[in-house]
Amino acid sequence: GENVEQHPSTLSVQEGDSAVIKCTYSDSASNYFPWYKQELGKRPQLIIDIRSNVGEKKDQRIAVTLNKTAKHFSLHITETQPEDSAVYFCAASNPQAGTALIFGKGTTLSVSS
Amino acid sequence: DAMVIQNPRYQVTQFGKPVTLSCSQTLNHNVMYWYQQKSSQAPKLLFHYYDKDFNNEADTPDNFQSRRPNTSFCFLDIRSPGLGDAAMYLCATSRDSRGLETQYFGPGTRLLVL
């Protein structure tokens, strides 16, 4: 089955710096890759997603890149702000496995001002 | 504007005492999911419904059951909660089951087992 590895597990940056979180997946049939942000005690919220027919997607300060050959995808946050502090989860979905989203273990991002 | 609603937000139960968590959605989505999330861990899928079709994950304990009486509502029943079942329980929905659709999460119910 699918396995998603996420690195790093914790990331500390200064306000205004960029943050990069990387994920790798094992099943080449996976074709949907969402990123969720979860603040303490709150629900996971989708911040950006990418499907396998594109290599990059951007939404203001957030971008995701996908390399299907290498089976990895990354989240890039530019000009980080303290409110970006949260746990970020990547996930992969393989239609052959049905609807299940396989999550990475999460990255705790801390942005200090 | 709440789209996926979970009640209660906090639930305290006693060891072995059955408990039911509820989820409702206003999105008219076909698929509803239940996830268990323990502290500092990723959400773990327990099961999902595509319409009325129930799909259980292989490693979901028999202690966990679910009901979906209609499109809008889905329930998680824990028949005999143990201390290890204390967690956040997240409900999510998606439009269909092709694996390409966005999943929208509810706020979660935090379960405490005494």
Image (cartoon, coloured by chain):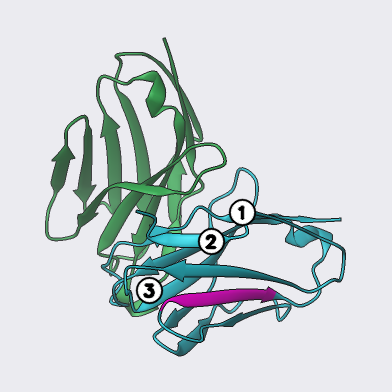
Q: Chain of mark 3?
A: A
Are circles 1 and 2 on residues that touch, CB within 8 Å?
yes
**Kind of residue at disc 2:** Gln
Q: Which residue is mark 1?
A: B9
Please name whichever residue, B6 or A4, is drawn nearer the observer in this view of the structure.
Answer: B6
Q: Residue at x 49, y 84 (%)?
A: B55
Same chain check for tags 2 and 3: no
Can you identify the residue that label 2 sits on? B6
Circle 2 SS class: strand
Magenta span dominant secondary structure:
strand
Q: Amino acid at mark 1?
A: Arg
Q: Position of residue A8 (x, y in %)?
A: 46, 34
Give the residues in magenta: B72-77
Q: Is residue B113 left or right of residue A37?
A: right
| Camera-side mark, 2 or 3 | 2
The residue identified by callout 3 is A99
Give the colour of chain B: cyan
Could you say which is closer to the camera, residue A5 or residue B3?
B3
